[in-house]
Image (cartoon, rainbow, N blue to C red):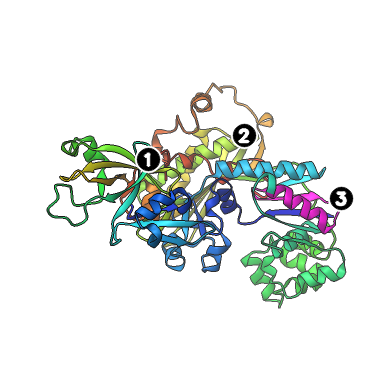
């Protein structure tokens, strides 16, 4: 699967950076700064390209029992196709990312990950990462049987 | 003088050409099955990750490392660009391997080497190290020691002695573990000891190949720059089969896949073979290699597959052993044009397969016996491997 992503700092507008207090997410392991978004973070959120705009939305529903939204951060491609999310009127979006993390393994993401945005009862948007069965290669790399639905990329 | 151009951590550098944000990061490129590191950046190397390390051992050593899937098609594109630049700079160039070239150095100053280095960096984006010396072996040794992004020249006796002094003999390309152990039994462990040893003794111990290296380390060039790949003595296809298996259908499917790849290579080089060798490596039993004599010179799928499947149960001993590597090797090669043809030869299914795959893509039409390898064929990256890059002289 994908428990976290990293995106280059340079891809995030300063306004968005300040609005969401993203400074706490900054890390440096190469020549360019990155922002890490992990499902285990105190504030669970992801960058999303929605209606052509790069925004930051809450990542799934980690622990709100009151919410009508599924209590997870991921959406199986199979269940989406089977119509199990239809009642939430999901919108397909792109989660831009440069790297993904699963079971301690950082893998490269070329464009991004497919996601869906759904709204909770207060009309707040939440993003779920779409997953599919892992390829043999990804499963060997990460020892996980699911992988994110990568855009125009095969691992 | 002979120059040697060697790309610095080539696969990683090639990835950094198209993904510049990987610069400065610990990066590892994974092999065919996503399990082992086949190339690593200097940052990852500094964390203790070595080539061949499985990813599950690399991650604890380098948790911030990024692991990439290999893409030999892209690496070949950059390799050929590098080759073209070296060819423009020299009249004699050997395409030694995907990331190395030997060339005739007409001008052997550091400035010239640095100009070539800059040109490759500027036009291809890949950093290289360059060595210039009187022989190929010394040139390769000095470029290796100049890494990363360095240039070195062996001009005279003093430079040569300085290069060889105390350097492990295993640093010399062509002296691997087995020969190193033989030499060590006679107290030879370093390059300078090897060069100072008796030539006849080295020949006795390591045959002509060893003697050639002895001349080369002593500054006498005996290994020429080969502009054209020498004729093959063997052609081999195979490698890891991923997770070790004792499933007969899966192992058999890999034999079929490797025979199909071997037939492609034989067709490319316009050769056929008199013998087929099957080599199996097990995780829990000693390696076994068996040879089959073919009925006449063969290069077609049916004949080679029949021989390979005949060898499979004989080589797979004990039959409960887990297979994890295999090679099918065509030996006693001869040009197809000189093959004794049968009176009863007819157009083969193989010809149709070749025609279809030329149009539709490699493996679009393949043997049904490969069906158990859905995972392998389901990944387009498996359609192109390092050995599919033709024209290199090293293998």
Q: Name the residue under label 1.
A: A53
Rendered location of residue B301, percent (x, y): 51, 34
Q: Do labels 3 and 1 share a chain?
A: no
Packing grade of label 2 (10 A; few <14, some 14-19, many >=20) is few
Packing grade of label 1 (10 A; few <14, some 14-19, many >=20) is few
Disc 2 is attached to a residue of which chain?
A: B
The foreground one among A11 and B163 is A11
Rendered location of residue A107, percent (x, y): 43, 53
Left or right? Give the position of A126 relative to B251.
Answer: left
Left or right? Give the position of B136 relative to B17.
Answer: right
Mark 3 lies on a secondary structure that is: loop
The foreground one among B192 and B147 is B147
The foreground one among B199 and A15 is A15
Task: Look at the image and say whether residue B365 sits in the magenta stretch.
Answer: no
Q: Which of marks 2 and 3 is nearer the N terminus?
A: 3
**Which callout, 2 or 1, points to the residue nearer the camera?**
1
Say which mark, if any, is on residue B106.
3
Rendered location of residue B264, percent (x, y): 56, 35
Residue B321 visible? The answer is: no
Mark 1 lies on a secondary structure that is: strand
Packing grade of label 3 (10 A; few <14, some 14-19, many >=20) is some
B201 vs A22: above or below: below
Say which mark, if any, is on residue B268.
2
B308 vs B27: above or below: above
Left or right? Give the position of A88 relative to B178.
Answer: left
| Residue interval drawn in magenta | B96-121
């Amino acid at each position: 699967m994908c428990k976290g992503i990293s995106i280059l700092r340079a891809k995030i507008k300063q306004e968005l950076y300040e609005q969401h207090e993203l400074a706490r997410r900054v890390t440096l392991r190469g020549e360019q700064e990155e922002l890490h978004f992990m499902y285990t973070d105190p504030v669970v959120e992801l960058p999303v390209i929605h209606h052509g705009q790069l925004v930051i939305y809450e990542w799934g529903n980690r622990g709100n029992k009151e919410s009508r939204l599924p209590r997870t951060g991921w959406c199986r491609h199979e269940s989406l196709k089977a119509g199990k999310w239809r009642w939430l009127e999901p919108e397909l979006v792109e989660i831009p990312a440069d790297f993904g993390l699963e079971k301690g393994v950082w893998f490269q993401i070329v464009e991004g990950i497919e996601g869906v945005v759904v709204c909770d009862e207060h009309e707040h948007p939440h993003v779920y990462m779409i997953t599919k069965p892992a390829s043999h290669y990804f499963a060997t790399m990460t020892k996980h049987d699911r992988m994110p639905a990568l855009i125009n990329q095969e691992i | 003088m002979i120059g040697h151009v060697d790309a610095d951590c080539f696969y990683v550098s090639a990835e950094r050409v198209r993904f510049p944000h990987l610069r400065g990061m610990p990066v590892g490129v994974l092999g065919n099955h996503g399990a082992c590191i086949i190339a690593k950046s200097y940052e990852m190397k500094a964390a203790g990750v070595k080539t061949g390390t499985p990813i599950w051992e690399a991650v604890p050593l380098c948790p911030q490392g990024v692991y990439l899937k290999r893409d030999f098609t892209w690496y070949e594109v950059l390799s050929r660009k590098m080759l073209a630049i070296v060819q423009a700079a020299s009249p004699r160039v050997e395409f030694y391997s995907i990331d190395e070239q030997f060339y005739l150095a007409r001008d052997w100053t550091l400035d010239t080497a640095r100009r070539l280095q800059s040109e490759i960096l500027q036009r291809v984006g890949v950093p290289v190290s360059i060595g210039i010396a009187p022989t190929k072996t010394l040139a390769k040794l000095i470029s290796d020691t100049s890494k990363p992004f360095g240039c070195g020249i062996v001009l005279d006796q003093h430079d040569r002695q300085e290069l060889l002094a105390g350097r492990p003999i295993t640093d010399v390309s062509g002296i691997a573990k087995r020969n190193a152990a033989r030499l060590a039994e006679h107290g030879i462990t370093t390059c300078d000891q090897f060069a100072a040893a008796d030539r006849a003794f080295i020949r006795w111990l390591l045959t002509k190949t060893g003697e050639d290296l002895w001349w080369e380390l002593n500054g006498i060039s005996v290994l020429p720059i080969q502009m054209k790949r020498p004729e093959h003595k063997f052609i081999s296809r195979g490698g890891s089969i991923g997770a070790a298996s004792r499933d007969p259908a899966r192992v058999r499917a890999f034999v079929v896949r490797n025979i199909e790849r071997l037939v492609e290579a034989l067709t490319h080089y316009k050769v056929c073979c008199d013998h087929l060798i099957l080599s199996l490596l097990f995780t829990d039993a000693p390696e076994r290699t068996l040879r089959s004599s073919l009925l006449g010179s063969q290069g077609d799928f049916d004949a080679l597959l029949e021989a390979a499947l005949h060898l499979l149960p004989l080589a797979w001993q004990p039959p409960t052993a887990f297979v994890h590597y295999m090679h099918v090797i065509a030996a006693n090669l001869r040009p197809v044009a000189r093959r004794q043809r049968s009176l009863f030869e007819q157009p083969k299914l193989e010809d149709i397969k070749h025609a279809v795959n030329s149009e539709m893509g490699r493996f679009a039409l393949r043997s049904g016996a490969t069906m158990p390898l859905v995972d392998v064929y389901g990944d387009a990256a498996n359609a192109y491997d390092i050995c599919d890059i033709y024209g290199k002289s090293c293998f």
